[in-house]
Amino acid sequence: MQITINHFGPINELDGQLSSRAQNLIYARNGTGKSFISRAFLYLDFKGQDLEIENAPLDLISDESPIGSFSFGSELVNYGSIKVTKDPRSHEMTLGDKIFHVFCHDFVQNEVHEQDYSLKGVSKKSILIDRENIEINKIRTEIEEKSLSLESIRENLRKALEVEKAMKLRDEIGINPNLNEYKSLKANTIAITDERPRRNKKTLAQISKDLTRLQNLPSDIRPIRIVNTNLHEVIDWADVELLLERETPKSELPLEVINKIEEYPEFYKIGNKIIIETFPANCPFCEQNISQQNVQLILKIYSEYFAGEEEKHRLLLQKRIEQLKNLENDIIQINYQSAKQIAIYSQLKLILPDYRETSLTSVAKEVTTLQNSIQQLVLALSSKKSKLNQSHIVRTSEMERTLDSLINDVTANNVKVTILNEQLQNTDNARRKLQREACRLFAEEWILDNWSTITSGHDLEDDIKALNKRLQQLEEKMPTEDVYEKISKTFKYLLRYFFEDKYVFDEKTSEISLGSTNFRRGLIRSLSDGEKSIIAFCYFIASIHGKVSKSSQYKNVFLVIDDPVNSLSFDYIYDVAQIIKNLTISEEGTISVNPSKISDAKFHRPDMLILTHSSYYYNMLLSNRAVKDESAFLLEATDACHRLHKQSVYIAPFQQQLMLVHKVSIGEKKPDVSVGNSIRSVLEAVGRFCYPKKSLTDFLTIIAGEEGISIKSVMINSLSHGTYFDESPTDDDLLLACKDTINVVDRFAKGQLDLL
């Protein structure tokens, strides 16, 4: 049986395997989480009785966690599970065919103490007697046979799945076994589908190749470059159209002057600028005197030409021509970079399966269109320079849209490239995604390969449901027994077992009396704490009858017993151990503690999980064979998680304390509040053995003098006896004390360390 817990009380994580036997025993030190295990079973008990379970999140979840979970069962059968959350407060509980009955502090308080140790709170209901009817027995036999066949199918599927997933996923592909998707591949979850999946085109072999390609990816792979979309020129397209449309009248200056200037425009433009700005006496080029009036008239004509509308218009046209040429150069560069970007992207995307179907948009067509349009527009602007008085209509809207489309396509490509670069720099996500996909594909292929077996299991499930429905119809006509009478009879029987005639239960008043007389001070004030514990335990066993609605359910009862021996002396502890050892239930629901009934075919020992922190009680159960050696376990808390260890030998407090000190000394466990007491107990045990007449203080003095081992005895005494100190010892102080203690044990009782 498997018990799995996450974030219940002090238990952060427990994935423990109990024995396959009906009775199991768990020993745990105080504070380990034992009570939270029994409390989880108690809420499953409440669920089975339709009692209030709203407080489950508050009573179960660890303080530091928002969620918690618990499950109990075998690989194929879930006996019970719990999922709870704090915010929002919610709970989800499922039950199998087991009927949980839990003895713990809450049971004693609610069911016994608050009822004044009487049976007045027993509900009035009946138990269906369903064992004599031939047809019912036949249906039950058929249900049992089909259930066994179904269990066999499930077990075979489970084994086949475990072998195949280990071989195909873990060994061949290298899937991490700790991956949640890998761990969740279980026959009882993936074989429940009623719909046959389709064969996927992708195969595990392809995923294996993809993972290999990722694994071989160079660690220093260079990222794909981003294409620069920042243009050197921002064209005012509307202004270009206006410049072409505008008609500038021809100058009225002499034609020969205009022709001369237009033949060498830059020469005259520069000369005119120098004369206007510097007023020279001589020509800046030929150095002739230009102060004469006739020369000044010619220069004035030149100046009027360059200040006229024609020249201004012509200058604006030239500026737009230069801008368009710059734009063409930018577009050519974008085309070159994009082509290179696309080529590299097409190669690298093959490494990541998620990106193989992606592609970058080619901009070559847009670039060609833009280049042709720009060149035509440049020709139009150049032509306009010589025909300023003629209107030329050109529409640039299509060029503008094409340019915007080009920039948008390049920007979109850059986004894809950025994402691919990020994925290539961190392939862990891609690797995990491939592994998850492999698990999903494996599940689909496994279902297809085992479909006939799976459908056989579904057919058996349908048959069992139909038989159960027929069984229910027949059971409604069967005779019944009174629950109170059965509980009273069993309660009287168990009281006599423990107390003989000292305490007597009166079925009419539902109360316990002192022999033939009533208690003068009242029952609660007259009983010792130990007697109250025994009476509560007797009622717990008797109240098994209250858990079933028909006699055939007795075999489904699962007892969880959490430390029933508080305040009990040796003889009562022994009696409780004998009850647990010899407890049997007959087919019709007779409860017995007679050992001879164990071998009676009509009686069976109920399923049982016993929890205790008493090493004495634990050893008593083992020594009296109440549970088998292979069914005894130790619940141990580590820093990261809890573990269940098989504990076939008796529990010795000294060994447990020495193990704790040893683990702290070697760094396997952090010091906690119990370390100080364990240190002192270990030193006292060794000291008493070596020097029976010496105190612990004397022993520490001896070993410090003769052996040269220094022990921080002040700290040890303060931790053991509660002496007040302003500051608690640090973890380093405790670690040093643990190491010193191990040195002492190594010197005086080395064999004890070997046993660890």
Image (cartoon, rainbow, N blue to C red):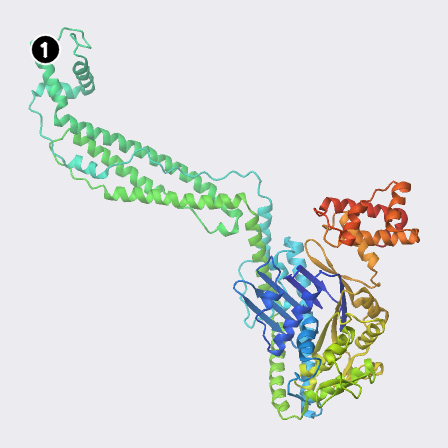
Q: Does residue 350 sit above or below 187 in this rendering?
A: above
Indicate the position of residue 467 as horizontal and vertical percent values: 62, 85
Indicate the position of residue 564 as horizontal and vertical percent values: 76, 72
Left or right placement of residue 380 versus residue 505 in this view: left
Instruction: Identify the residue at image location x=80%, y=75%.
Output: 576
Quarter of the figure with the N terminus: bottom right
**Quadrant hosting residue 80:** bottom right
Q: Does residue 530 sit above or below 325 in this rendering?
A: below
Q: Does residue 595 sit above or below 69 in this rendering?
A: below
Identity, as a three-letter code, of the amino acid under mark 1? Val
Q: Does residue 509 sit above or below 21 in this rendering?
A: below
> Residue at label 1?
295
Q: Nearer the viewer, residue 178 or 409?
A: 178
Q: Secondary structure at mark 1?
A: helix
Quarter of the figure with the C terminus: bottom right
Instruction: Identify the residue at image location x=38%, y=43%.
Output: 411
**Is the residue marked by circle 1 packed among few (<14), some (14-19), or many (20+) residues within 10 Å?**
few
Q: Is residue 586 visible?
A: no
- Furthest-front residue in view? 520
